[in-house]
Amino acid sequence: MKTGTATLPLHGGKAPAWLFSRMRLLAREITLAIVSEYGPEEMLRRLSDPVWFQALGAVLGFDWHSSGVTTTVCGALKDGLRGLEHESGLLVAGGKGGVSRKTPAEIEAAAASGLLSVGPQALIYASKMAAKVDSAGLQDGYQIYHHSFFFTRGGSWAVVQQGMNDLNRKARRYHWLSETVTDYVVEPHKAIASEAPGTAVLNMVAKESLPAQDVVTQLSHDPPDRTLGHLDRLKELSMPAHHAVELRDIRPDNLKKIFLSTYERQAESFEVLLGMPGVGPKTIRALTLIAELVYDTPAGRSDPVLFSYAHGGKDGYPYPVDRELYDRNVEILRKGVAQAKLGRTERLDALHRLARATADTGARPREAQEE
């Protein structure tokens, strides 16, 4: 799993209309140029790369360090590509807040309109599982509020979703890519971008959580009264202060209906259990706590965001600029803009921004950077 950090403070408001209209135009033309040169699957790969995604937001003229770059760039792409599905081979569903919950319906509508060469169910499942994993399978203190689903006519897909933490006023972005997902519940992310650490992390999709997944799945087969009995007894214990999975906000009586549902379903795997309607963070936390304290099967608690992924800074912080990586990303964007059918002024403005970005970060020789 690629992991990394970026400063994404929560910013209110939205992009002004004059800027967003231009972002939409430029995002559309860059996408069409990349699709023409490399194919629609390559655009999905770029969107799943947090470095490239952040660079795209900067080229489009949005604050590079704002959490709003996620929602605004995704919105510009969705608006800009609307009606060009045949030409681009790309479709975009979802968005911020309540719009994110319309993703399955938007995928079904695309299929009904003949825009897909595959059935919609696998795409709908991918969208739902990505959202479920990042809200219940990986509990890191960031509440998902944005979910954008990018997909091709042939069924390839990428997800860009974002969560917020009201306590530290920071955001965390989660990137998924279909061609790198071999298991939805074992290290499925292409990248996770965040500056601040997670809080009380429960990482049930880490490799070290595989034994816990098995026990949790088996616990979901137990009669509800037996599971609730475990929780009642655990509430009587004096839990260590550092324990990452806490009982304080888990009310067994409120979980009885869910446990009855899991008992009747008898899920054959953790993935099936996680995908069940009604199974959310508290259900997974409760079963995980029982698995650990009753059956001695600990779950992963490592925050999947471990190091800085960005290009670096000209002053060497958080590390010297990786010129090869930066130049490759800039060249892809430069080629996209050069091939775009933009007005002369907007094209020159975009190229000037790219040129300034290259000059500002590439001033030092490579040897100096590697010292």
Image (cartoon, grey):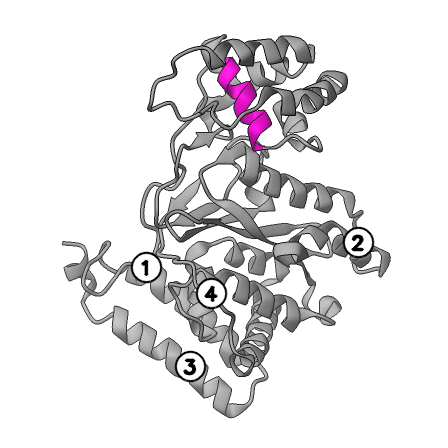
Task: Give how far apart the Cα atoms at labels 2 and 4 are.
Answer: 39 Å
Kindly state the secondary structure of the residue where label 3 is placed.
helix
Task: Give how far apart the Cα atoms at labels 4 and 1 are.
Answer: 26 Å
> For mark 4, what is the residue?
12
> For mark 2, what is the residue?
117
Q: Nearer the viewer, mark 4 or mark 3?
A: 4
Residue 75 is drawn in which quadrant? bottom right
| Image location of residue 130, percent across then percent down | 60, 42
Disc nearer the start of the sequence (4/3): 4
Binning the other alpha carbons within 10 Å of mark 1 as few (below 14), some (14 to 19) or many (20 upward) gives many
Disc nearer the start of the sequence (4/1): 4
| Image location of residue 134, percent across then percent down | 54, 40
Mark number, residue 174:
none
Disc nearer the start of the sequence (2/1): 2
Dots 4, 3 in contact, CB < 8 A: no
| Image location of residue 100, percent across then percent down | 65, 54
Dots 1, 3 in contact, CB < 8 A: no
The residue shown at (79%, 53%) is 117
Q: Nearer the viewer, mark 2 or mark 4?
A: 4
Kindly state the secondary structure of the residue where label 1 is placed.
loop
Task: Give how far apart the Cα atoms at labels 1 and 3 are.
Answer: 19 Å
Give 76 or 81, whichever is nearer the viewer. Answer: 76
Binning the other alpha carbons within 10 Å of mark 2 as few (below 14), some (14 to 19) or many (20 upward) gives few
> For the C terminus, which image quadrant?
bottom left
Q: Nearer the viewer, mark 4 or mark 1?
A: 4
> For mark 3, what is the residue?
351
Task: Report the span colored magenta.
Answer: 281-291
Kindly state the secondary structure of the residue where label 4 is placed.
loop
Mark number, residue 311:
1
